[in-house]
Amino acid sequence: MFRRRNAATADAPAEPTADEVKAEAAAARGAVTAGKGRPTPKRSEAERRRRYQLSAEDRKAAGKQARTKDRAERARKTDAMRRGEEWALPAKDRGPVRALARDYVDSKRRFSEFYMYGLVVLLFLLFLHSSVIQTILPVVLILMVLIMAGEGFWIGSRVAKLANERYPGQSTRGIKMYSGMRALQIRKLRFPKPRVKPGEQI
């Protein structure tokens, strides 16, 4: 009996020891190709890292070039605005109705455009200690305001009527105030610059 059991035990494969198990695991790990140990970065992250790796001189030169380009673009847009090109104008100055209002105001010399010069003269007269001037000055100021208000109202009404005739269906909202305010500006300081000279027909 005992002999048979010993023989069966001798035929069975021996169980591996702990050292043998560790050796086999190490061999299996060595057979597998080692990875990078980190995930592959996205393209946007790689581009950002590549940009950050630029030298300080390269970043400084790139910033200077970008600022130069921005200044050139702003200058180009400002010149286009002065010329009245539609694409460069702010929203309040766009449209054929607004262009018509500017041309109508610029086509004649008006009392309102000398308003600023008159204010400078009145300010100077305020410092003169003369009873006659101090009495006349308020009357002159009131007359100037009345004349400018009347001229502005007349210009605005005329522009609105002309716009309805030439551009039917176009909105004329705010065109009266727009025309009156342009008439108050000194001609050389108007923006956009006048396209017509005084006396020209529009």
Image (spheres, rainbow, N blue to C red):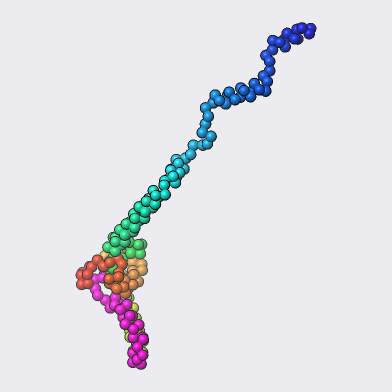
Q: Is residue 110 left or right of residue 91?
A: left
Residue under the image location 59 percent in, 25 percent down: 26
Q: Quadrant of residue 159?
A: bottom left
Residue 128 covered by magenta stretch: yes
Does the rendering let one see residue 154? no
Of 133 and 2, the residue lying toward us: 2
Residue under the image location 29 percent in, 77 percent down: 114
Does the rendering let one see residue 93? yes
With respect to residue 111, does 40 lie above or below?
A: above
Of 199 and 113, the residue lying toward us: 113
Residue under the image location 69 percent in, 10 percent down: 11
Residue 144 covered by magenta stretch: no
Q: Quadrant of residue 108?
A: bottom left
Percent across and percent down for residue 122 are 33, 83
Q: What secondary structure do most residues of the magenta stretch adopt?
A: helix
Of 200 and 117, the residue lying toward us: 117
Q: How many marks?
A: 0
Residue under the image location 36 percent in, 67 percent down: 173
Percent across and percent down for residue 83 are 27, 63
Q: Residue furthest right?
A: 1
| Quarter of the figure with the N terminus | top right
Q: Residue furthest left?
A: 200
Magenta segment, which residues? 105-133
